[in-house]
Image (spheres, grey):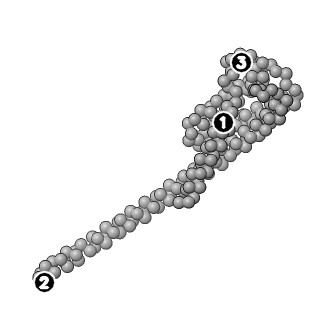
Amino acid sequence: MCDIFNGIFGFIKDLGPTIVGLTGLFIGYLYNKKLLKSKNTDERRKEIYKQLNEFYGPFQQLINKSKHLYQIMIEDKPDNFRTLIALLENYNFSENDKKLIEEIISIGKRTEELILTKSGLIEDNELRELLGKATTHFDIINKSYNKIITGDMDKFKDYVFPRNLDEKIIDNIKKLKDELESLNQV
């Protein structure tokens, strides 16, 4: 009986360091997994802040300014007034309206530059498509204001400013902020 005890005790004694070693490996694995998850969370947070600060925030400010100037300009215009169509039809704008349009075009150029340089921060393909339409609009409205292109409204009517762009931007900002809040709770 003593030999059996000694055999079992010897086996446990020999197996002990292996168990301790495996336990250490397992604990190390869990720690590294947690550390990697934390690092990934931190990187995602930085990425979201970069998207919000370098694209979405500046974009929203530019578009809001343009929208406010546009609202001033169309105050005395019909409900369905579209600047691009009016320009193509040689609408007789007041001098004040012309100045507002010039500022809107200037904002459009800055917005287009922002889109061209920071669109890599955008993850939403539908938004990318809308931004492409917006940059085309900025270009066409500039050319129509400067009489580089005129008439041919049927050809250009689909290039009015995409009004659903604001909603899409706001939705993406909300999604990013919600994700950030979720990451901050981890």
Label 2: which secondary element: helix
- Residue 68, percent across and down? 79, 38
Image point 68% across, 17% down: which residue? Answer: 154
- Left or right: residue 43 versus residue 146 is left
**Residue 142: quarter of image:** top right
- Left or right: residue 35 versus residue 71 is left
Residue furthest top in the image: 152
- Residue 125, percent across and down? 56, 36
- Residue 147, percent across and down? 77, 20
Residue designated by label 2: 2
Q: Earlier in the sequence, mark 3 or mark 2?
A: 2
Image point 31% across, 67% down: which residue? Answer: 22
* Label 2: few (<14), some (14–19) or many (≥20) C-alpha neighbours in 10 Å: few
Label 3: which secondary element: helix
Label 1: which secondary element: helix
Which amino acid type corresponds to the residue marked 1 in the rendered image? Leu
Q: Is residue 166 visible?
A: yes
Residue designated by label 1: 165
Q: Earlier in the sequence, mark 3 or mark 1?
A: 3
**Residue 89: quarter of image:** top right
Residue 153 marker = 3
Q: Distance of mark 3 from mark 1, alpha carbons?
A: 22 Å
Which amino acid type corresponds to the residue marked 3 in the rendered image? Met
